[in-house]
Amino acid sequence: MHKLTHILRLGLKELTSLRHDSVLLLFLFYAFTVAIYMPAAGSVIGVHNASVAFIDEDHSSLSRQMAEALQPPEFQPPAPLAYDQLDRVMDSGQYTFVINVPANFQADLLAGRQPGVQVNVDATAMSQAFMGAGYIGRIFQRELLSYSGQADTAAKAPALLTTRALFNTNLEGGWFLAVIQIVNNITILAIVLTGTALLREREHGTLDHLLVLPLTALEIMLAKIWSNMLVVVLCTWLSLEVVVKGLLGVPLAGSLTLFLFVTALYLFASTALGIFLATLARSTPQFGLLAIPVIIPMLLLSGGSTPLDSMPEWLQWVMQGSPSTHFVSLSAAILFRDAGVSVVWPDLLALAGIGLLFFAVALARFRKSLAS
């Protein structure tokens, strides 16, 4: 009973210290509001408002129909361009796509020949160039089939392919990006808050005061974990309700209660990792240098930025030992697919196992650092 009282009071001391740290409070506010809203609302993954120039050497009704088919919001209205200006505008990056319809294009098509349309792509705009070229190809194919009277070709095909997008019908990239930003910020804060809190006490001599009290390393460590866990879980809940659901309008289909429980479990592992790194460092700058090569792979290789399936197989196995990998999987499953415990229990068990392992290693290292 005394140990629980010690853990509770030490945790309250951590919360009091955080309450008087205005810079850290400002960072928390930024991390769960502005840093969530701006990328999700401002970053568009895909083709949006792409600039197009149209070289019409045919001057036919078909070429005008093709130009008019490129419409907002994916494309800007095509700007007319002379053929001799093609190289100049591509070199200057003025347009992402420059489309050239050759002379006699309509006549060749009606005569049964197969004329070509040249689509010049500025591939330095990688995301728009890759997907936009496919969009333009499908749009032109539809218009040409319609013009040549073959609109019913798809109905006569031996197989009909029907695509349905589940959980995000309009393929809104900002929905997923908002949740991933929260996941990434949780990872950063979990490691940084606990690590800097421990180092701040060491640098200010507070840790030496704690050691003369009847306290154990386990009590000190658990106090730091539960206090920082409480702060981050509360900020996560407010961010989901106010920013993600309120300002961004993302429909979260799953249980927020289950997600917050998973967040607490993930924080148990991440805060333990932060304490472990803090025991290796002797100052806050050293801790920052140690944290960078740990946090960056956790963010980039967890499956949030790049799907795990697209990574080398050996790297997929390595990342199964990272708690962030399972947390990203759990977040998408719970919030978007409304998955319950019966579906996500393998990742829950893996996350709990990794957390216990990290906690045991961090506790052993923390005890050793206190004795030295």
Image (cartoon, helix red, strand yellow):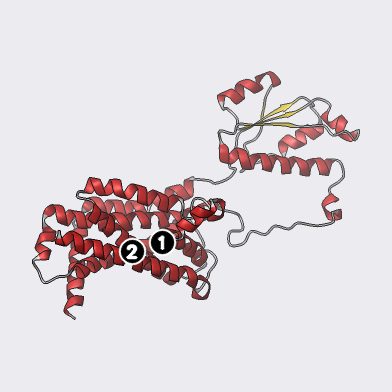
Q: Residue 230 at x, y = what percent?
A: 30, 66
Report helix, strand or loop for mark 1: helix
- Residue 226 image-quadrant placement: bottom left
Camera-nearest residue between 236 and 194: 194
Q: Which residue is mark 2?
A: 358
Q: Give the residue at x 84% y 34%.
A: 114
Residue type of the residue flagged with mark 1: Pro
Q: Give the residue at x 8% y 66%.
A: 212
Q: Which residue is mark 1?
A: 323
Quadrant position of the N terminus in the picture: bottom left
Q: Residue 321 at x, y = what percent?
A: 43, 60
Is residue 350 shown above or below 92?
Answer: below
Note whether residue 319 is visible: yes
Tag 2 and tag 1, C-beta contact below 8 Å = yes
Query: Which dot, 2 or 1, sits closer to the camera?
Result: 2
Camera-nearest residue between 263 and 268: 268
* Count of all numbered marks drawn on residues in the image: 2
